[in-house]
Image: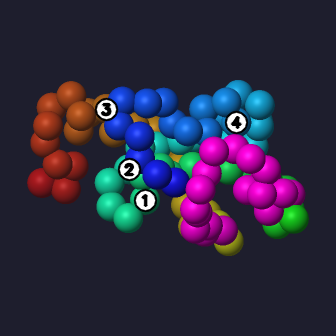
Amino acid sequence: MQCHIGWLFPGQRARSSHQEIVDCYNASGGYDYLLKIIAPTISMFQDLMEDDIGIEKFASRIVLRQPYPQRGEPLNVIAHGVASWK
């Protein structure tokens, strides 16, 4: 996906029309965006990525399991700016 500084995410229209796209992050590094897509099958994921949603080039990672459940945001760390392990 090419970066378009000052523009919305190129797949913004796809985000509203494809419920499988649940999160989108503008990221640093080798990729411009990180999408969280939930699809019940690999073929459904492939169909979504082959649809014209504004993504020129992509790499995918499939989550095999979640070793521990997602927890809430560390509000105490954020509010006080102190690392939790210190």
Q: Residue at x 51, y 36 (%)?
A: 9
Residue matched to label 3: 75
Q: Main secondary structure of the magenta part?
A: loop
Q: Is residue 36 visible?
A: no
Marks 2 and 1, how far apart at CA:
7 Å
Sequence-wise first label, 2 or 3: 2
Residue 4 placement: quadrant: top left
Sequence-wise first label, 3 or 4: 4
Q: Nearer the viewer, mark 1 or mark 3?
A: 1
Say what secondary structure mark 4 lies in: helix
Sequence-wise first label, 4 or 2: 4
Question: What is the crowding at mark 2: few (fewer than 14 residues within 10 Å), some, or many (at least 20)?
Answer: few
Q: Which residues are magenta?
A: 44-62
Sequence-wise first label, 4 or 1: 4
Sequence-wise first label, 1 or 3: 1
User: Label 3 sits on what residue type?
Assistant: Leu
Q: Nearer the viewer, mark 3 or mark 4?
A: 4
Q: Residue at x 35, y 37 (%)?
A: 5
Residue 54 percent across, percent down from the top left: 63, 45
Q: For this rendering, which residue is in front, 45 or 5?
A: 5
Q: Nearer the viewer, mark 2 or mark 3?
A: 2
Residue matched to label 2: 27
Q: Residue at x 66, y 68 (%)?
A: 62
Say what secondary structure mark 1 lies in: loop
Residue matched to label 1: 31
Residue matched to label 4: 14
Q: Residue 61 in magenta? A: yes
Q: For this rendering, which residue is in front, 65 or 31?
A: 31
User: Label 2 sits on what residue type?
Assistant: Ala
- Cβ atoms at labels 2 and 3 below 8 Å apart: no
Q: Nearer the viewer, mark 2 or mark 1?
A: 1
Residue 69 percent across, percent down from the top left: 57, 54
